[in-house]
Image: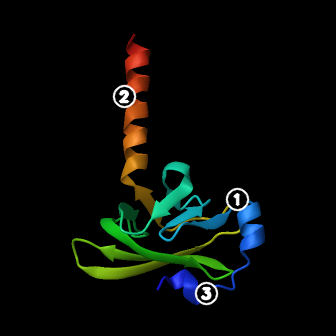
């Protein structure tokens, strides 16, 4: 059972209509937040991500689950190296909020590297 199934009472209509948060199938989540760096703002359970922690540490994590509780968007992650579970949360309401952490998808990182290479090539052309 997914955590969102335990919290089915979040008001999905304004969040979805405003393009802030919605579930996408059984295992993906659309989250418009500066804390989430992923193509199309979509993250998927079972996928590997990079977590930039508030203390500056960078961890390789796997997304286990996520849910919105009408106030916060909550992520349950598994730290692959240290074999421990981590919970992070942030307010997702359409306003800009400071992020003490960032979840970055490997695809997003690859897009950024590709952009840097293309820009460097074009500048030297």
For the residues labelled 3 and 1, the Cα–Cα distance comes to: 20 Å
Determine whether the residue tagged by mark 2 lies in a helix, strand or loop.
Answer: helix
The image quadrant of residue 87 is bottom left
Q: Are marks 2 and 3 in contact (CB under 8 Å)?
A: no
Residue 11 visible in image? yes
What is the number of the mark on residue 117?
Answer: 2
Quadrant (top left, top right, bottom left, bottom right) of the C terminus: top left
Residue at point 25% right, 71% down?
80
Q: Earlier in the sequence, mark 2 or mark 3?
A: 3
Q: Earlier in the sequence, mark 1 or mark 2?
A: 1
Please determine whether, in this image, residue 41 is positioned above or below residue 71.
Answer: above
Which residue bears the numbered disc 1?
19
Q: Position of residue 114 (x, y in %)?
A: 38, 34
The mark lying in front, picked from 2 and 3, is: 3
Relative side of 64 to 2, left or right? left
Which residue bears the numbered disc 3?
7
Determine whether the residue tagged by mark 1 lies in a helix, strand or loop.
Answer: loop
Please determine whether, in this image, residue 89 is positioned above or below residue 61.
Answer: below
Q: Nearer the viewer, residue 22 or 86?
A: 22
Q: Position of residue 65 (x, y in %)?
A: 45, 76
């Amino acid at each position: 059972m997914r955590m969102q199934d335990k919290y089915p009472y979040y008001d999905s209509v304004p969040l979805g209509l405003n393009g802030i948060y919605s579930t996408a199938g059984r295992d993906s989540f659309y989250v418009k937040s500066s804390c989430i760096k992923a193509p199309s703002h979509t993250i998927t359970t079972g996928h590997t991500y990079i977590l930039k922690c508030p203390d500056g540490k960078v961890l390789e994590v796997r997304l286990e689950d996520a849910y919105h509780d009408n106030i916060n968007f909550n992520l349950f992650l598994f730290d692959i190296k240290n074999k421990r579970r981590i919970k992070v949360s942030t307010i997702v309401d359409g306003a800009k909020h400071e992020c003490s952490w960032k979840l970055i998808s490997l695809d997003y990182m690859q897009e950024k590297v590709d952009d840097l290479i293309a820009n460097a090539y074009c500048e030297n052309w």
